[in-house]
Amino acid sequence: MGVSRLVENGRVKHLITSHLGLNAKAIDMMNAGALEVSFFPQGILAEKIRAGGAGLLAIVTDIGIDTILRQDKTVIPIGDAEGLLEPALRADVALIHAAKADRAGNLVYEKSSRNFNPLMAMAADKVIVEAETVVDIGTIPPDQVHTPAPFVDHVVAIERLTPEYGVLKHHVQ
């Protein structure tokens, strides 16, 4: 469900994303001025987050240099080329979903969860992980860890789905 419930309940003022997909409520809120949205191409968004996690101030890219993306951006000359200065992104809190976590906070993701989750864990001051499965420390082989425990502050295990309400109940580990 991602951040949809937070957006739909008015808990998000500014959304930074690569697309809104089929979230009609978020699109309506954006069009009504109830939600500020900043769009970035997915690769640029990932790189801005990665830079924030690496302690960099910004990245320079030529993607979008001859498009509308150039508007309101600082243009940096580099040799015979130009690049757009994109400030790095950091977050106060990252809400991350993992397939597996150990009790120390070492994380394993499945499929496309590996695209942004490791980057967000590095670029946030507080990382809260929702894990499908929580195992004992030492159960996950070190070479299978996608995000190491030092980046994780809290692990929440998904207990079960309650059909009568359609909501997940959680148990904090």
Image: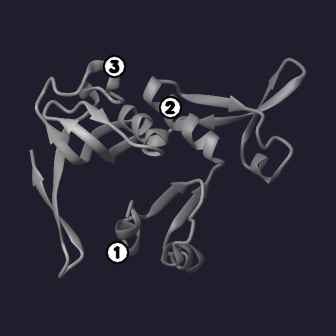
Task: Give the amino acid type for the residue marked by disc 3 in the picture.
Answer: Asp
Secondary structure under the numbered disc 3 in the rendered image = helix
Identify the residue at horizontal 50%, vertical 37% (top origin).
Answer: 49
Residue 139 placement, left or right of 34: left
Q: Which residue is mark 3?
A: 143
Q: Which residue is mark 2?
A: 50
Give the percent coordinates (x, y) of residue 30.
Answer: 55, 73
Give the percent coordinates (x, y) of residue 124.
Answer: 35, 38
Pointer 3 or 2: first along the chain: 2
Residue 72 placement, left or right of 42: right
Task: Give the amino acid type for the residue marked by disc 1 in the picture.
Answer: Asn
Secondary structure under the numbered disc 2 in the rendered image = helix
Real-space Cα separation, disc 3 to disc 2, in angstroms? 21 Å
Q: Nearer the viewer, mark 3 or mark 2?
A: 3
- Answer above or below: position of 169 versus 64: below
Q: Which residue is mark 1?
A: 9
